[in-house]
Image (tube, rainbow, N blue to C red):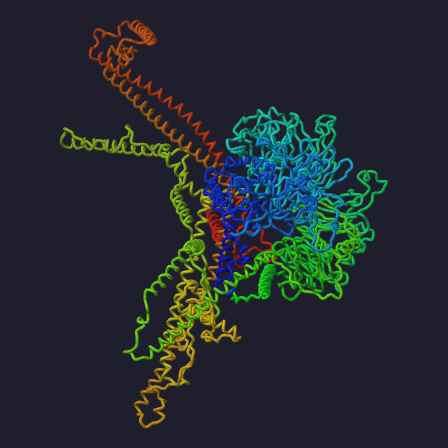
Amino acid sequence: MADEENSEQIQDRNEEKQEDQLTTQDGNPNNKDDQQETLPTGEPATDDEAKQVEDTGTAEQQEVPGTATVDEPITADANEADQSEVKAENETETDAERSTEEDLKPSEGEDKTSDNKANEEDTENRQVVDEDDKVTTESSTTEVEGGTGTTEPTGESTADKDADSTLEVKEDSEGVPQPSGDLQEPSEDDNTRTGTEHENAANTSDEGTIPAENTLNQTQENEVEIPLSEAEDKVTEDKDQSQGAASIEPTSQPQDSQVTNAEVKTGESLKVDDEKTPEASEGPSPSASPGPVDGQAATTRGDEDEIISQGVKGDSEEETIPDSFFYNTAEHVSKALICEDSGLPDNLLSLRHSFGYDSVKRANLHLLDDGIIMFVAGNLVEIVNLNTKEQTYLRSSSGGGVGALAVHPSRKYFAVGEKGNSPNINIYEWPSLKLFRILRGGTQEAYAFMDFSPDGKLLSSVGGDPDYMLTLWHWRNEKIELRSKAFSQDVFQVSFSTELEGQLTSAGTGHIRFWKMADTFTGLKLQGQLGKFGKTEISDIEGYVELPDGKVLSGLEWGNMLLWDGGLIKVEICRKGHKPCHSGPIMQIIMDEGELMTVGSDGAIRVWDFESIDTADGTDETGLFEMEPMNEMKVGHGHDVSLRSIIKSVNEEEPTIWFAQDVNGGVWKLDLSFSHTSHAPEKLLSYHAGPITACSASPVTNLVATTGRDKTVRVYDYMTNQTVCEGRYNCGGTCMIWCPRTVDPKGATIITGFEDGVVRILNVSKIEDTDKQRRAKGDTELLLAQVFKPHSKDVTSMALDNRGETLATGGSDSTVFFFQIKDRDTYEPIGFVETPSPVTHLTWTPGHYKNTHLLVSCAGGHVMDIALPEEGKFDTSKTYHITGLDTKKYQFKSIKSHLRHEEDLERKKKEEQEMKKKKEEERRRRRERGEDEPDEEEEEKEPEPEWHPYVPDEPSPILAAFYSDTDKFWLSMDEFDAGYLYECQLSNKEQSEPVRSIPVLHSNDVPISSVLFTENHKQVIMGMKNGAIRIQTLESNDFGEIGPYWVLNMHDNNYGHVTSMALSYDGTFLFTVGADGNFFTYNYMNQDVLDRKVAEAKAKIPSARKGEEERKVDDIDDPSAYSIEDAKQKAEYDKMMKLAEEKKQNVRRTIARMRRDFKKLLNRNDELPNHLMLARPEFEMDPRIKMELEQQKQEKIDLVKKELAWQSEKHGIAFEKLKQKFKAVVQCERIVVKSFQTDHEVSSYRSSKLSDDFFTLKNEMDCKRSLSLTSKDDLSREQTRHLTTGEQGSSEGEVTQQEITENKIYTSLKGNQGERIRKALNKVEEKKKARAERRSQWNYLYKNKPDEDYEDPDDVAAIKEAKENMGDYKLKAADDYVVPDHLRMNVEKARSRLLTIKDLLNKHKFNFNQHLLALRNKKMQIIDDIEKLVTQLHDAQISLEEDQRKPVPKVPQMHPSEVPERKLEFTRETLLKFKSDMESKKIAAITGKSGGDGFGAGFSGAGAGAGAGAGASTGTAAAPPAPKANEVIHKAGSPLPPAKHAGSLHSEDTEKDDVSVTALEIKIAEANEIRLLYEQDYILGKIEELVRNFDAELRVLRHEKFRSAVELKNADLRHVTLFEELVLLKDFEKSENILAAKVDDKVNEKLEIQNKIADVKQKAETKRKDIDKLMEKEKALYATFTASVGDNNKFGEYLTKVFKKKIKRAKKKDRDGEGSDEDSEDESEDESDWSDDEDDDSEAGGLDLDVCPPGCDQTIYDNTCALREKRLDIEEALIEEKKTAEVLKKELENMQKKEKIIGSALKKAEDDLEAFQVEKQKKINELDVVVTVKLNQIQFMTINGVLPQDLSPSLVFEWNGVTKLHHRIKELEHEKSLQKKTTKRSTQEMCPAY
């Protein structure tokens, strides 16, 4: 809302002027100047519109100054009706994307998505013209009031708009104002048109002109609405580059195809007040407008005519521009910018030929016709005929360069997208090269790419930084169809789909986007879908192609291809073996006649199977699809060729021929038939690739040489426009000199410097006719005559002295090397000198100078003047470094801010003078009219804000330098100091300001990169960094008197800075090379021709008439001067105001007289006696009057407070924000504590508080650290130890002490025999107990027996400690170094260390600051104590004689820097003191006397004087209040009066009468005197002690500060190292987490399987014990059976068979009698088996085993049967247990196999993690760690015991590491001695004789 604020400020200023004028005699509120500045008020915007204003952030809804021009008078009622209608229309529209349906149509293609909404709202303003000049405005906001319509185009800065710019409108039949012109910025060329326009404007209405007065009637009769998108081409809103007042509408005349003009003019404003009606503006000025100059865009149509569409009947028919209409191309071509009244011709430089090609630029090769190519060359479009090599050039219309080209599918037209401020797209017809169409408003600064639709109806364009706007044009009608922001970064390409209409694709930096033109209910929209890379790494996309089915195939940076489907990646395509499709980015993908071709930067063109790619799909997790190309062509050899793009030939007879753009500087012709008859690639054109760094012309012939970063040196014949020869080397060239005749009379020697510091001497020579092999390449070659390497880095500049005897070379290694030229072809080194910074330019003194010196310019702003070194004078036997050479140094000091400040002051001074001149003119006019002159009070000027010069931190580099006089030279600076040329002088000072400076006019502070003087020194040619060629004429030999300028933009304005320039040997040709790869040759106008042209351009002024007295006539300069009637009315008004003012003065005089009378009355009342005196309230007639006045005053105060409440709150909030931002975060400000007696001082650390995020993060780190105290290895071992070592609970078979029954032994025997038997039995029981105890111990030992692979943790830890800390010392940089677990770093540890050191730094600073603050408080207490002591001393000295009084010490004061918190504190006393000081300064300034010494003059020293002075100057509360300070100072500094009191010994009374004094009184006086002298000495000693002790403490703290500063510096360096380590570890974090997670998973799997194995083992052991128990039971059962049968039982064998018989046993589970057939079959089989056995048994023994035989004991038989049942039970249980044990055994074996697999996987994962840790450690080792060591800590010496200069091979050990190594040496010695003793003792034991 900048304009609105400006308008409010102007209105406020006008009101202030009116109020000031009312209070003076000449108070005239109707001053015409004020009326001119008064702005019309507009209707406020609606809520929706205001919201749009806030969203766009632009100056919409502004009240544009000026008034509107209408055809009929507009009354106030009509205005109100218009406003109400417009307001009603705005209120009914609630949707911000829609307009009124009756009058306005929605803008087509206004995409309102969130990502481009702001950009579309910035471009909402459009204007529409119907067939009868009806103009409507569609905007997001419109204000109309009083017949004045204002529109503000969004997206433009209001700061660029002139305050007087106006918009003329016409009123339609409904009263709604309609604009009829553009918002344009008035300038000198405003309201002017070409001669053709003026001539057309003068035509009568019968010739086709529509009279202005009939426009409104025609609009009312035939009113047609035209959509916005169909009429944007009619009225443009480009104001910054306009050359005319309004855009001209093309019109078609069927009679003679001539054009007429019905232009309406904007830019002039008519004054409108309440009593006047605006009239129609007059026609344009007859002066012709020249064509646009460089830097100014040609946005207006020069000879274009207004076109009225024929037959437009309604909205359905579009308004079109006829194909027969063309612009005047000459008027739209940018020309040279020439200084006014200079007379310099336009053709001072004329382009002759172009040898360059910007091969690096994207899509910079286009085919216009068969054998005719087109490309961009700086500010030119170059068209080359490949057959004839003929070149044709088209200059840009803006002068800002060319951004992109596009060729129409019919090849009848081509588009040129330019660069600059709001550039245009120019459509040219081929081959006539006529300007066919101009497209405006597509982007802000540059077009990056353009493409025509397949049918040629639409043109797509995409802009560059900063808007990246995608625009679709109906280019034939010059209208915008759709537009949207393409992306937030660079967009490389945009193209239409060849198969699917309405679809586009754009791609660029890290993105690809798919667009669709969708027809929605609000109109046609452009919708974009951003491609999602997903898991694929984001890549820049250079090339892509739309497939017929809607898929898109794009290339990647690493050479693969992506197949996109619906905004998602379907598959990534690569070659077999995961090889990339190309070795480098894919620059272009082409779909031609069913073949899919890719063009790569590796110089390869490959053809792929379309069907395979279209149906490709990922086959594995990688998502890659592998395939091989069908055909392939490799252009060039190795890396010599890097293709950017290819285009197909238009010759139908050669369908397989393509032309390729080579980034390495070439145009190729390719045969892509891929057959055995295919032709080899042919290089048609060869150029420099990339920047051309230097050029130099031959001194004898028509040759010029160039070199560039492409490692080549080329020689051209500029007369025949051919390349003579070229040479290629291993590094790029940087500078070049073609030796003059003084060095080589033949002119064949070229000196070239290269990037690697090498200088090569090259000779251009012809090849002998006999050498046919060499002549096949040409008849000329470059021969290497000599080569040497004077520099370690690139050679930046070279220079030959005037005698041709010495060559000087400068390099980036900050050295200048001198060579002696001998025998004209031998260069011998003299030596080198060092410079303060890299060398940028070298130049020798001119030939007429007495001494030869070299002027060296450096990048750091340094200049050196070096005398010519004489050969043999310096010793170069050991080194070429020259010392002692006469050298002067100069350091440039920036003064640009001073110059700009002086220019601003001069400008303001001129404005003031102009204002005074206007006032004087007004007074003169009043005197002529006989009016009284007003008494104007002098307005108080507002104080100028304090100005501080700006000096850049880094000095600006010097680009060029040359001598102007002895010890004087001119400098051309880069960066901040550009825009001026500085003359400097060498002096003894290292740094000084330039002695003189001249501005480079109209250069926009663009640096001058190179300077070249003509041979006659009448012109200087400057190469600018924006690619422009600037020629300045020199009026004399003094460069400071520089003349007019001539500027022509040639090279690219963004990156094409002019690197070098050269003149031909005869001065008729100029050569320029630039960083954009372009090389231009120009015809340079001869000096005689130039002088004649300049003379012809000067106007012939007629001579003055003789005899006629010269009359002085005052001209009317003010355009707003009063007319005669206005002057008369103004005079009458002034007379009325004067009478009113006189009346006011009379009233004021009356009031003053009454005041004087009242004062006299009060004085008389005061003289009366008290009883007659009247009280003051009795004089008041009515107290209510005073109360009312007080109330009115209070109301005004309250009103002012309310008016300022918002500002007060705003500033209060701003203050709080600033305080929170800058003050609240400061933990301690910089406090300086100064010493009393010395200059010592100690300052605090200005530290900031740690943020809450820091403490939060630190707490999180502490919690994580506390949770990870237990190591994973201990957890994994302890969890399974009790399972693997056999630790179990007490089993059933264990014999414990409790199970042993301690039964007492009893016997029935008595006596000795019984006693012996009892003892024997006791012994037996004791033995049993002992055996049971031993058995229990063995069981315990077996139970606790560890596994064979078990390792004691203590032993493992000891072995680990020994491995890590014993033996050789492992270096972290060693290849076999294994990072221990506790030393492995990760992000968490690094972050924790970073937080810890940051916390320690803060605590350290905080503790020191606390110590310092305590010392400061102590100093304040000491000052108070000293003040008290001084008071005591003063009291004591009153009773002493003057000769006995010692000087009273001054009471020190606190310096303001010691109490910075008091800076903003003040009291009423300090304010009054400050006010009195300021008044005294004013009085002193008036009288010419300085103020008195003041009370501060008595203080001096570090602690007093400075503080007092500062306190007085700042008016702060640092010093005490004035009265108290004066009192203290009187006590401390002023002499005391002589003692005159009663107690003094030598008083006047004593002198008068000595007899009255007794001896006792004398003794008492002497004792009192002694006491006072002692008290005086004690007080002085106490003060001195306080001061001395404080200074001692301050010095101690100062030393502590020094130590602390060292520690903090080391900590800061450590902090930097830790931060770099953290950044590095973050890069490894993801991979490390993956590997660590894999190891953790494997460890968990191993723990899980170990747990399962232990569980199975436990179960198996339990089963084994169960089986043993069952077997024991079986054995016991057999023993029981044997015992029951007896030994000699005759049925023993029979009973044994019965016992062992297998019988059928019923199953334990109940059966219901119903079973399956299988069960019955099994039972039958079992029965048969058992029956067979029974038969066999019965037959064998002859007895039935089921019946007890006779004679056998039935009890024994039954017992046997019962035991048999038990046996069978045991056998069945044993079988089941064995089966279970077998299953457990197999399960255990499987688990053990799985454990081995998991173990191997864990080992592999740990190895991977270990390898990753080693790799990470290597990267960490690459970080530089700063270690501060003392000299005695450095023990790295050479053989001679000398400290080497290079300590890089040394190692830095920590002291504890060295101590451990020394300790280990002693341990090894001790172990060695022990081993020797052990060996000796063993030997003696084995061989005693030995």
Q: Is residue 1448 visible?
A: yes
**Which residue in the rendered view is the most extreme toward the bottom?**
1555
Between 951 and 101, the residue placed more toward the observer is 101
**Residue displayed at 54% across by 27% down:** 618
* Residue 1824 placement, left or right of 1314: right
Residue 1588 placement (x, y as % from top left):
42, 72
* Residue 1490 placement, left or right of 1259: right
From the viewer's perspective, is residue 1703 above or below residue 291? above
Q: Residue 867, located in which quarter of the rendered image?
A: bottom right
Q: Is residue 568 visible?
A: no
Between 1714 and 910, the residue placed more toward the observer is 910
Between 1046 and 28, the residue placed more toward the observer is 28
* Residue 1243 placement, left or right of 1195: right
Residue 443 placement (x, y as % from top left):
59, 42
From the viewer's perspective, is residue 1664 above or below residue 321? above
Between 476 and 1618, the residue placed more toward the observer is 476
Residue 396 placement (x, y as % from top left):
68, 43
Report the number of numbered marks: 0
**Residue displayed at 35% across by 20% down:** 1778
Residue 1399 placement (x, y as % from top left):
43, 52
